[in-house]
C-alpha cells in the first residue's frame, strides 16, 4: 500500500468513478523485492493491476511463490524447530525517499501440514546503513517459525531403534553353549546399520552438525559392537582349553572374588555339603564327587583285593556287584593302610599284585587329571558367566543413559512428545 498524489481526482467531477485499475507498467510502484530470494527470476511475483482510489491510495497485491535461501539446522532432528527469514525492502530507494511500515502477517489461510506445524510468523522493521549514503535503508523481515512433527519419525525410526538396542542386551542372557550369541549380536548390528542408512537418506547432506537421531544411532551401534567384542571374550572363556593353562591370579581375584561377590553369584556346587566318613582313628573325606566304575578281573574267591594305599596316594577301591571297582580318592591314616595290607591278602612280592598295583595307580592318575581339567574348565565357565552378568548390568545402564540423555537433550522434546504423541 502507498499513496501517489499524482493519481488523485475529484469524485464530483467524475461521478461514479471510485476506483481505477492500472497495469503495473503504466504507473510508478515501489521496487520491493525479497532480498534473500532463491528464485531463478529473483522476483517470483505475478504482475497484476494496481488498484487506485480517488485519494491516490494505491493497492498492489501480486501473488507469488517465494523461494528463499535459509539455514537449516538439523542439530535436534527429529525434534527440531526451523526458522527462515524473509527480508523485504526497496532495492534502490533509501529511507528518505521511501519509508517502510510493517504489518502483521496474515496466516488465517494456512493449511495444516502433516510434517510441519507453523508456530508463527513474527516480523520486525530494521534500518541498515551503508558507506555510500547517509540515509538509512529500511527493510521488513518476517521470520517463519516451523516445528517438525515427530510422530512419523518416532514410530518408524526411534521406537524400532530402542527395541533393537534392547534386543542387544539379550546377547548376555543367551547361554554360551547355544552357539547363537555372536549371530544375535551381528544381526542386531546389521539392523541398526539399515536404520542408519534410512536416516541418511532423509537428512540433508551437511557437515555443520550431527543430527540428534544420528548421535543416538551411533551410540547404540557402538554399544552393540562393543557387546559383540565382549561376547567373543565370553565365548573364549567358556570354551577355554584346559591344556592352555590355569586362570591368572589377578583374573581369579577380580572376576571370581570381587565381581562375583558384587553380583551375588556363587559357583555351582558351592553350597553342597561334601560327604565325610570316619574310619578308625582318622576321618577320611572323599575328595572326588564323581565315582567311576572300572572293570576288574574276578578273583578266585569273588572278593576285592585292597593294596598299595601308600603308593596310590590315597586311592580307595570298593567292591561292586558286577565285580568291578569304584575308585575314589581319600586320605587315610597309616594304621588303616597297614591293617588293610595285612588282612590276609597276597604278599607284595607277587608279580600279579604288582601289575594290578600299576593299573590301579594309572587309573588313579587318570581320575586326578580328569578332575583337575574339569575344575579348570568349570573355573573358566564361571568366569564367563560373571563377565556376562557384569556386562548385562553395565550395558543396560549405559543404554538407558544414552537413550534418556541424548533424546531428552532436545530443547523442545517435552513439547513434541506432548503434542504429537498425545
Image (cartoon, helix red, strand yellow):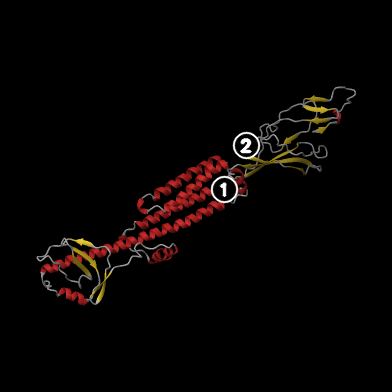
Residue 199 visible at all: no
Q: Which residue sits at x=52%, y=43%?
A: 157
Give the residue pinned by disc 2. 113
CB atoms at circles 1 and 2 under 8 Å apart? no
Q: Earlier in the sequence, mark 1 or mark 2?
A: 2
| 303, 388: nearer the viewer | 303
Which class describes the residues within 10 Å of circle 2: few (<14), some (14-19), or many (20+)?
few
Residue at the outermost right position: 12
Point out the image quarter for the N terminus: top right
Q: Looking at the image, which is closer to me, 286 or 78?
A: 286
Mark 2 lies on a secondary structure that is loop
Rendered residue at 40%/48% (across/down): 183
* 170 relative to 44, above or below: below
Return the x and y of residue 395 as percentages of the image width and height: 47, 55
Image mark for residue 212: 1
Q: Report whether 362 appears left or right of 257.
A: left
User: Based on the displayed image, in which of its 4 quarters is residue 308 positioned?
Assistant: bottom left
Q: Is residue 189 visible?
A: yes
Nearer to us: label 1 or label 2: 2
Q: Is residue 351 left or right of residue 10?
A: left
Q: For mark 1, give the secondary structure.
A: helix
How many C-alpha atoms fall within 10 Å of the one at disc 1: few (<14), some, or many (≥20)?
Answer: many
Which quarter of the figure has residue 356?
bottom left
Residue 104, horizontal then vertical, whole percent:
75, 39
Where residue 383 appears, as percent x and y from the top left, is 38, 60
Nearest the eye: 126 or 199? 199
Q: From the top left corner, tell me how far across and down residue 397 is, in percent.
A: 50, 56
Distance from Cα at disc 1 to Cα at disc 2 = 23 Å
Which quarter shows the C terminus?
top right
Amino acid at each position: 500500500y502507498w499513496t501517489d498524489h499524482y493519481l488523485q481526482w475529484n469524485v464530483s467531477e467524475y461521478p461514479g468513478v471510485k476506483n481505477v485499475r492500472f497495469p503495473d507498467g503504466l504507473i510508478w510502484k515501489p521496487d520491493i523485492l525479497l532480498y534473500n530470494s532463491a528464485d531463478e527470476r529473483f522476483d517470483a511475483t505475478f504482475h497484476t493491476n494496481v488498484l487506485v482510489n480517488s485519494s491516490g491510495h494505491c493497492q498492489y497485491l501480486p501473488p507469488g511463490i517465494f523461494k528463499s535461501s535459509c539455514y537449516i539446522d538439523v542439530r535436534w532432528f527429529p525434534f527440531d524447530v526451523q526458522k527462515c527469514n524473509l527480508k523485504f525492502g526497496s532495492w534502490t530507494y533509501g529511507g528518505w525517499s521511501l519509508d517502510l511500515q510493517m504489518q502483521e502477517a496474515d496466516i488465517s489461510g494456512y493449511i495444516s501440514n502433516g510434517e510441519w506445524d507453523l508456530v508463527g510468523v513474527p516480523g520486525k522493521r530494521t534500518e541498515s546503513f551503508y558507506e555510500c549514503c547517509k540515509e538509512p535503508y529500511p527493510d521488513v523481515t518476517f521470520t517463519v517459525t516451523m516445528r517438525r512433527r515427530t510422530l512419523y519419525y518416532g514410530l518408524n525410526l526411534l521406537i524400532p531403534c530402542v527395541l533393537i538396542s534392547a534386543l542387544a542386551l539379550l546377547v548376555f542372557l543367551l547361554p554360551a553353549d547355544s552357539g547363537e550369541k555372536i549371530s544375535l549380536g551381528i544381526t542386531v548390528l546389521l539392523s541398526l546399520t539399515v536404520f542408519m542408512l534410512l536416516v541418511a537418506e532423509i537428512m540433508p547432506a551437511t557437515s555443520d552438525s550431527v543430527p540428534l537421531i544420528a548421535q543416538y544411532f551411533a551410540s547404540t551401534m557402538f554399544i552393540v559392537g562393543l557387546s559383540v567384542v565382549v561376547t567373543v571374550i565370553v565365548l573364549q572363556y567358556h570354551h577355554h582349553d584346559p591344556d592352555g593353562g590355569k586362570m591368572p591370579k589377578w583374573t581369579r581375584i577380580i572376576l571370581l572374588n570381587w565381581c562375583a561377590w558384587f553380583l551375588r553369584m556363587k559357583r555351582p556346587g558351592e553350597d553342597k555339603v561334601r560327604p565325610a566318613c570316619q574310619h578308625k582313628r582318622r576321618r577320611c573325606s572323599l575328595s572326588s564327587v564323581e565315582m567311576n566304575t572300572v572293570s576288574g578281573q574276578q578273583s578266585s574267591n569273588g572278593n576285592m583285593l585292597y593294596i598299595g594305599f601308600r603308593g596310590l596316594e590315597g586311592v580307595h577301591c570298593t567292591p561292586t556287584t558286577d565285580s568291578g571297582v569304584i575308585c575314589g580318592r581319600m586320605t587315610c591314616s597309616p594304621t588303616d593302610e597297614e591293617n588293610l595290607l595285612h588282612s590276609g591278602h597276597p604278599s607284595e612280592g607277587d608279580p600279579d599284585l604288582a601289575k594290578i598295583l600299576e593299573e590301579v595307580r594309572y587309573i588313579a592318575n587318570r581320575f586326578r587329571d580328569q578332575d583337575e581339567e574339569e575344575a579348570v574348565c568349570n573355573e573358566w565357565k564361571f568366569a564367563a558367566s560373571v563377565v556376562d552378568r557384569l556386562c548385562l548390568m553395565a550395558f543396560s545402564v549405559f543404554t538407558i543413559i544414552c537413550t534418556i540423555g541424548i533424546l531428552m537433550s532436545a530443547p523442545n522434546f517435552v513439547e513434541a512428545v506432548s503434542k504429537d504423541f498425545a
